[in-house]
Amino acid sequence: GDVRVNGRPAQAGFLVRPGDVIETGARSQAVFIVGRDAYLLRAGSRLETAGKEMLINSLRVITGKLLSVLGPGARRIATPSATIGIRGTGIYVEAEPDRTYVCTCYGTADLQSSLKPEEQETVTTKHHDQPRYIYGASMPGIKMIEDAPVVNHTDAELVMLEALVGRKPPFLESGAPPY
């Protein structure tokens, strides 16, 4: 498919570094590894990265969908409507102009509304326990952070990403039914 890094067409084996911008076209996706982290960027996405050497510590999902498995250490994901602080986590994010979907597949994430920073929540999960919507526009009767269903990502994808960095997701040990 059409995958670009810093505006240039990417090919298998292309090196992704902190500071790069990765974009996927329609019906395209990219799987890439940086250090101890692995990523699956779905079609129609734009991801801006920041960090030092071979560690991405900040991701900005401008639009689209990103599934990540992250090794130890703090990271931050920003979208138009949310900021997410994560540590050694499997996480799926969908960024839309007025809403972000976040599934902390396993691990801990600090969720915060960009519109109302005082609206925040910390979730710790073992297996897709607490997916959330985070809204970018205040609407009467709707909280800025609310429960959501599990959508658009699978355990098989998490297993594949973890295998790329020599790990297994923790839910495999629990015998939980797959998503």
Image (cartoon, helix red, strand yellow):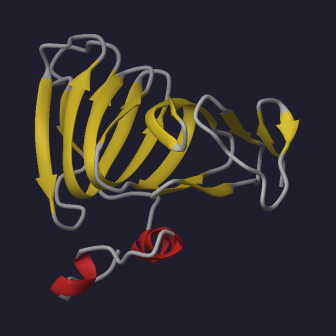
Q: Nearer the viewer, residue 164 or 43?
A: 164
Q: Is residue 148 left or right of residue 34?
A: left
Q: Is residue 72 left or right of residue 174?
A: right
Q: Residue at x 27, y 42 (%)?
A: 86
Residue 126 occupies which quadrant of the picture?
bottom left
> Where is 149 relative to 141, above or below?
below
Q: Can you give x and y, in whole percent of width and height, for residue 39 in the image?
A: 53, 54
Q: Residue at x 12, y 52 (%)?
A: 124
Q: Is residue 59 left or right of residue 179?
A: right
> Which quadrant would the N terminus be assigned to in this image?
bottom right
Q: Can you give x and y, in whole percent of width and height, for residue 93 in the image?
A: 42, 44
Q: Residue at x 48, y 39 (%)?
A: 56
Q: Can you give x and y, in whole percent of width and height, for residue 32 in the image?
A: 62, 56
Residue lying farthest front?
Answer: 53
Q: Is residue 84 left or right of residue 166?
A: left
Q: Nearer the viewer, residue 161 or 119?
A: 161
Q: Nearer the viewer, residue 16 or 115?
A: 16
Q: Can you give x and y, in whole percent of width and height, for residue 174 in the image?
A: 16, 84
Q: Residue at x 27, y 83 (%)?
A: 172
> Where is 131 relative to 81, above or below?
below
Q: Nearer the viewer, residue 140 or 80?
A: 80
> Which quadrant would the C terminus be assigned to in this image?
bottom left
Q: How many marks?
A: 0
> Where is 22 relative to 98, above or below?
below
